[in-house]
């Protein structure tokens, strides 16, 4: 008999949780009572038709909505293990974004060198040691599976890279600051199938280091990359579950209609 | 439940392949009935027809499988659609096996007739089990067409009855063989026929299980009747 109890590999640990989250764009209520767990080192995908609130929900996680006046949160998003409510006004959004980074639909490298793109977040944090920066940049580029392609051109402008490379560079930029969660907002919708495949492969690899929340319009992508899926509609979470259950036998008829293409 | 996809082409592909399964089921059912007829009437001609039809049944299975692969590759079906396609694939495999059982019966009938020992044997007593089995297959196909889980459950129950008939028949054959060893050869042929009939019931039962899988998403193979009824409830 083993002396210690080991948890099975698939026993998830809670990394974050939204509790009764409402969100308003001015008078318009875009999210209603969304309660959902986000498990550590797992990929959670948000699916649903345009306007269902999935991107709005994602953006709550790094306080992106704070940038616009009139936007209002109600409810909580708790981040673990320190149990902090990241929507609390007392919590600095910059600090939240250090811990929860984001990768956007269109690759958005800064008009700087490849090296500086990845080092940027660390420099903002006040990191000055060149050797430390070099180590971190290399590690991030390796983790984002782009090191081999850029290691000899670190001083070239990042905008010279192809779309798929730019997106992996943006993922490296996110990884460089050791975030706890990375938010992906349709990260492959501007990419061709090969580049999409490499990003999906990458998501599968980096989830060992970081928790991932991804919004995607491509249901097959959600089926391929995620461990958990939430189907959202009209600002509410209709169904949340283990990916293979959702795609084989969802509990709710609405979910089934959407994923089988009967939605209209 | 919205029965239509946004893509009407997808709908027509699913309907098309479902229709093909029903056609194949109809053909196999007539094949098994003809095999039973050849047994009860000792008709060489019926037996020959059963054997000839087999090539057609095999071709249909291949055809339907090709169509299924094509739909899966192009549509990437999920949930109920995916379950339907998987169930269709398994159903056609079962139907093809029923066709094979019909051919086995036909061959045995031919062998019994040729050995000229037919009249001495209780072949007519097989007709109850044979009727049950072919009736069960028809019910399974009807239930498949209507995706009727209640009917599927009753098919699972009826299959047990066929199994009991089979056991009773085997005991009877043993009596014949002990009384008159000259009937052993023909009795063995008849035993294979009885076994083939029993297998037809099993295939009907398998199809009934796939119906429950399509509708309820639960795999009820190798479970108890209580579990099946719990799932369907």
Image: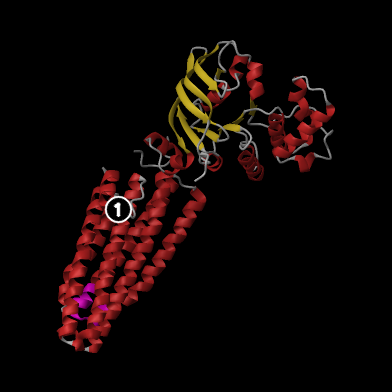
Q: Quadrant of residue A177?
A: top right
SS for callout 1: helix
What residue is rendered at 19% in x and 61% in y? Answer: B161
Tell me which segment is drawn in magenta: B36-47
Q: Is residue B70 above or below residue B118?
A: above
The N terminus of chain B lies in quadrant: top left
Q: Is residue B89 above or below residue A46?
A: below
- The location of residue B104, given as percent across then percent down, is 31, 76
**A256 left or right of A141?**
left
Q: Where is residue A32 in the image (x, y as percent from the top left)?
A: 45, 20
The residue where tag 1 is placed is B145
Vertical placement of residue A57 versus A261, above or below: above
Say which chain tag 1 marks.
Answer: B
Q: In this view, does A254 lie above or below B233?
A: above
Image spot of residue A152 (x, y percent): 84, 40
Residue A16 percent across, percent down from the top left: 54, 25
Name the residue at 22% across, 73% down.
B36
Dominant SS in magenta: helix
């Amino acid at each position: 008999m083993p002396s210690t109890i080991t948890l099975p590999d698939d026993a998830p640990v809670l990394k974050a949780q939204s509790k009764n989250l409402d969100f308003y764009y001015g008078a318009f209520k875009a999210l209603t009572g969304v309660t959902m767990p986000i498990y550590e080192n797992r990929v959670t995908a948000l699916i649903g038709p345009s306007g269902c609130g999935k991107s709005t929900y994602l953006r709550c996680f790094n306080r992106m909505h704070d940038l616009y006046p009139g936007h209002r949160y109600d409810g909580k998003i708790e981040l673990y293990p320190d149990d902090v409510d990241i929507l609390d006004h007392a919590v600095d959004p910059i600090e939240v974004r250090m811990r929860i980074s984001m990768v956007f639909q269109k690759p958005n490298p800064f008009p700087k060198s490849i090296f500086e793109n990845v080092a940027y977040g660390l420099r903002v944090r006040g990191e000055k040691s060149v050797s430390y920066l070099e180590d971190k940049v290399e590690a991030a580029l390796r983790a984002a599976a782009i090191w081999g392609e850029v290691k000899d051109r670190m001083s070239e402008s990042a905008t010279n890279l192809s779309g798929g490379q730019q997106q992996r560079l943006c993922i490296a930029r996110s990884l460089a600051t050791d975030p706890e969660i990375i938010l992906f907002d349709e990260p492959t919708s501007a990419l061709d199938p090969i580049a999409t495949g490499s990003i999906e492969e990458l998501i599968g690899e980096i989830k060992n280091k970081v928790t991932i929340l991804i919004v995607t319009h491509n249901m097959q992508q959600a089926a391929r990359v995620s461990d958990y899926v939430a189907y959202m509609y009209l600002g509410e979470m209709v169904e949340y579950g283990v990916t293979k259950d959702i795609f084989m036998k969802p509990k709710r008829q609405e979910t089934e209609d959407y994923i089988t293409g009967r939605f209209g | 439940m919205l029965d239509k996809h946004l893509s009407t082409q997808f709908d027509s592909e699913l309907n098309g392949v479902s229709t093909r399964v029903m056609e194949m089921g109809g053909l196999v059912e007539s094949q098994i009935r003809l095999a039973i007829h050849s047994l009860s009437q000792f008709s060489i001609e019926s037996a020959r027809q059963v054997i000839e039809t087999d090539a057609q049944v095999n071709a249909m299975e291949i055809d339907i499988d090709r169509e299924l692969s094509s739909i899966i590759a192009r549509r990437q079906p999920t949930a109920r659609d995916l379950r339907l396609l998987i169930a269709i694939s398994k159903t056609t495999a079962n139907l093809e096996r029923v066709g094979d059982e019909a051919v086995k019966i036909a061959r045995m009938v031919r062998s019994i007739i040729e050995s000229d020992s037919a009249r001495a044997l209780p072949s007519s007593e097989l007709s109850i089990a044979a009727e049950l089995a072919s009736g069960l297959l028809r019910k399974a196909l009807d239930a498949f067409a209507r995706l009727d889980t209640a009917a599927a459950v009753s098919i699972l129950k009826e299959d047990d009855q066929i199994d009991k008939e089979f056991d009773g028949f085997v005991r009877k054959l043993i009596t014949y063989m002990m009384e008159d060893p000259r009937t052993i050869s023909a009795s063995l042929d008849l035993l294979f026929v009885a076994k083939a009939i029993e297998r037809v019931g099993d295939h009907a039962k398998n199809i009934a299980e796939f119906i429950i899988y399509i509708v309820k998403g639960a795999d009820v193979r190798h479970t108890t009747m209580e579990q099946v009824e719990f799932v369907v409830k």
